Image: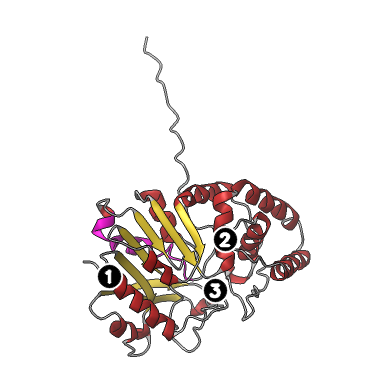
């Protein structure tokens, strides 16, 4: 008589943290290339602090928090809604999830016309009730940010000169508004993060030899029609790009590992803007997908640059 085989059901692995927003210029697609260019100090465990001063969708932070032994992270942005959202998700995930559940249950049963009305009502409330302190938590407003992001046209986050969210309704058939497991995984990752509404220059107060910094600023336009830099009401022009390069050189002198991404001006014309600005550092050109153009036929692969201050 043969002994019965005993089958064990493998435990489900915890969900790895990943971006919770659709974000123009998000780095999820570029992660394999970024990882190929991580500093040896990170791979060998010498880095214990990560800084991301243009946090956006936070794709690289969530990847590092899931796969590397990072003890502390600093996440900055000048977009107050992002900072409010991430602080809320870090501190009050249950309340945020309850609000999203309520919004989803109200929105999804509606027909297209009533969905548009619902969206515009939320957007109007969102724009007329802005919070003065974005570094505190506000579950309802954070839920509205996610809802608008998930249901607006192309999943953009764009504001006008007054800071008002101005993206129109997106008409998705079955948009996913509540994704509880993903939110909880992101909340768990954010427990190591100090999340601040701050200019990128704050990096200068924190960086040291045991730090890895990833800069993903608003990209410099590569053509006259590629002007989407309005993640916040403040413009990020060439003057700001130069100010960032000055900080990059100052932090390099401290021994911190730095990686920076931006558009490649040589895609269409012979413009060595970044080659001059970051002369002396390693400049790599990589292919990346652009998906924010309103015309699908205008989306595709373009070159971007990676600049690093290590081998």
Depth check, mark 1 against mark 3: the one in front is 1
Disc sitting over residue 252 in the figure: 1
Depth check, mark 3 against mark 2: the one in front is 2
Residue at x-position 45% and y-position 83%: 221
Position of 105 compared to 156: left or right?
right
Toward the viewer: 3 or 302? 302
- Indicate yes or no whether the magenta region holds residue 39: yes
In the picture, residue 33 is in which quadrant? bottom left
Position of 17 compared to 138: left or right?
left
Residue ID for mark 3: 231
Q: Which residue reaches farthest top?
A: 1
In the picture, residue 177 is in which quadrant? bottom right
Disc sitting over residue 267 in the figure: none
Asked if one can make out residue 130 in the rendered structure from this viewpoint, the answer is yes
Residue at x-position 54% and y-position 79%: 234
Label 2, secondary structure: give it: loop
C-alpha gap between disc 3 and disc 2? 18 Å
Disc sitting over residue 135 in the figure: 2
Q: How is the image coloured?
A: secondary structure
State which region is magenta.
25-42
Residue at x-position 35% and y-position 71%: 260
């Amino acid at each position: 008589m043969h002994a019965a085989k005993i089958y064990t059901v493998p435990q489900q692995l915890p969900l790895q943290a990943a971006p919770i927003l659709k974000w123009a210029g998000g780095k999820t697609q570029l992660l394999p290339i970024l990882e190929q260019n991580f500093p040896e100090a990170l791979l060998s465990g010498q880095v214990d602090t990560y800084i991301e001063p243009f946090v956006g969708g936070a794709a690289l932070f969530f990847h590092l928090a899931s796969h590397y032994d990072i003890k502390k992270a600093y996440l900055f942005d000048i977009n107050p809604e992002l900072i409010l959202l991430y602080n809320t998700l870090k501190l009050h995930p249950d309340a945020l999830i309850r609000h999203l559940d309520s919004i989803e249950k109200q929105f999804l049963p509606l027909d297209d016309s009533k969905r548009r009305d619902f969206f515009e009502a939320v957007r109007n409330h969102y724009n007329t009730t802005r919070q003065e302190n974005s570094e505190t938590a506000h579950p309802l407003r954070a839920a509205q940010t996610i809802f608008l992001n998930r249901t607006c046209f192309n999943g953009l986050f764009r504001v006008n000169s007054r800071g008002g969210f101005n993206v129109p309704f997106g008409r998705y058939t079955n948009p996913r508004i509540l994704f509880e497991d993903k939110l909880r995984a992101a909340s768990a990752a954010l427990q190591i993060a100090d999340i601040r509404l701050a200019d990128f220059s704050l990096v200068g107060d924190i960086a040291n030899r045991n730090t890895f910094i990833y800069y993903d600023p608003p990209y410099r336009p590569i053509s006259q029609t590629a002007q989407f830099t309005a993640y916040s009401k403040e413009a990020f022009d060439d003057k700001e790009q130069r100010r960032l390069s000055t900080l990059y050189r100052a932090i390099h002198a401290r021994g911190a590992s730095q990686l920076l991404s931006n558009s490649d001006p040589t895609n269409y014309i012979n413009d060595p803007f970044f080659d001059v600005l970051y002369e002396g550092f390693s400049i790599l050109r990589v292919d990346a997908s652009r998906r924010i153009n309103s015309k699908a036929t205008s989306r595709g692969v373009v070159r971007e640059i990676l600049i690093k201050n290590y081998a």
